Image (tube, rainbow, N blue to C red):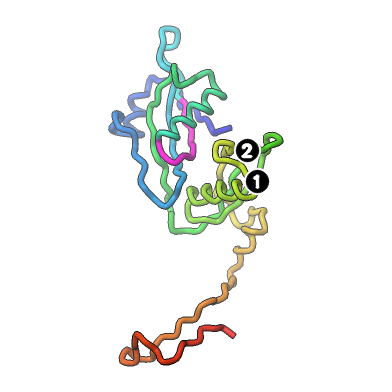
């Protein structure tokens, strides 16, 4: 359901905490932005016991509105994949992942599994956006509009940046044109000189493109 990465025994948990978050007493706070869903990296493990003093550390990437819900989703999926739950586990670190190039348009492929009224289905989606958080926001909006799927019923399995030659959806391929043009729907008439500028006009300007 989610990409679970086994970090290894907790012998190096102190070094892992130091590398992920220097101040382990405070979780990384979510920065307020334009996206409703943010990508988090949650690292957790089972509580050390006498039988297993060095439990395995697990790392998972999830999308959630804030860090609190990210930890909740982490325990939800880890409980299904491994015999670890919140009552006998602990969170090592929570970090928000940001886009490396947030001003470049990219093609994102998202593999999802969702629950409908009739059962569970797998699906592959493609979106064009500048960030992965924006593409995930488009995914949730489209799934709720086209398939009436609620947010808790959507499980993101995998995400990837897709090259233009590997894109499959026509809605994404139509933008892969070096000579693409967009119509100018509004033509603003400006004065020829600053002294001809005025607030009121005797005649309403015509902005029609005919």
User: What quarter of the picture does the C terminus occupy?
Assistant: bottom right
The residue depicted at 67 percent of the width and 58 percent of the height is 170
Tag 2 and tag 1, C-beta contact below 8 Å: yes
Magenta span: 58-67
Tell me: 178 left or right of 198.
right
Looking at the picture, does residue 137 appear above or below residue 57?
A: below
Looking at the picture, does residue 111 appear above or below residue 52?
A: below
Q: Residues within 10 Å of mark 1 (few under 14, many from 20)?
A: few
Looking at the picture, does residue 79 appear above or below residue 35?
A: above
* Secondary structure, magenta segment, majority class: strand
Number of labels in the image equals 2
Looking at the picture, does residue 22 appear above or below residue 145?
A: above
Element type where label 1 sits in the image: loop
Q: Nearer the viewer, residue 189 or 124?
A: 189
- Residue found farthest to the right: 118
**Residue denoted by label 1:** 147
**Residue denoted by label 2:** 114
Residue 29 lies in quadrant: top left
Q: Is residue 157 visible?
A: no
The residue depicted at 60 percent of the width and 63 percent of the height is 176
The residue depicted at 49 percent of the width and 81 percent of the height is 187
User: What quarter of the picture does the N terminus occupy?
Assistant: top right
Q: Is residue 148 visible?
A: yes
Q: Position of residue 196 (x, y in %)?
A: 34, 92
Q: Residues within 10 Å of mark 2 (few under 14, many from 20)?
A: some
Q: Position of residue 151 (x, y in %)?
A: 55, 40
């Amino acid at each position: 359901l989610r990409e679970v990465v086994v970090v290894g025994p907790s012998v190096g948990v102190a070094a892992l905490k130091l590398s992920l978050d220097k101040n382990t007493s405070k979780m990384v706070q979510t920065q307020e932005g334009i996206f409703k869903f943010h990508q988090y990296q949650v690292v957790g493990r089972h509580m050390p016991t006498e039988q297993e003093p060095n439990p395995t550390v697990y790392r998972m990437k999830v999308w959630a509105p804030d860090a609190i819900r990210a930890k909740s989703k982490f325990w939800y999926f880890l409980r299904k994949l491994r015999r670890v739950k919140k009552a006998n586990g602990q969170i090592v670190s929570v970090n928000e992942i940001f886009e490396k190039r947030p001003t470049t348009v990219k093609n994102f492929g998202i593999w999802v599994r969702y629950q409908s009224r009739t059962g569970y289905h797998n699906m592959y989606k493609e979106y064009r956006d500048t960030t992965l958080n924006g593409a995930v926001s488009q995914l949730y909006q489209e799934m709720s509009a086209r398939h009436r799927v609620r947010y808790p019923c959507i499980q993101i399995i995998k995400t990837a940046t897709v090259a233009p030659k590997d894109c499959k959806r026509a809605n994404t391929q139509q933008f892969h044109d070096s000579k693409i043009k967009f119509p100018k729907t509004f033509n603003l008439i400006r004065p020829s000189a600053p002294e001809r500028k005025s607030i009121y006009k005797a005649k309403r300007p015509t902005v029609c493109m005919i």
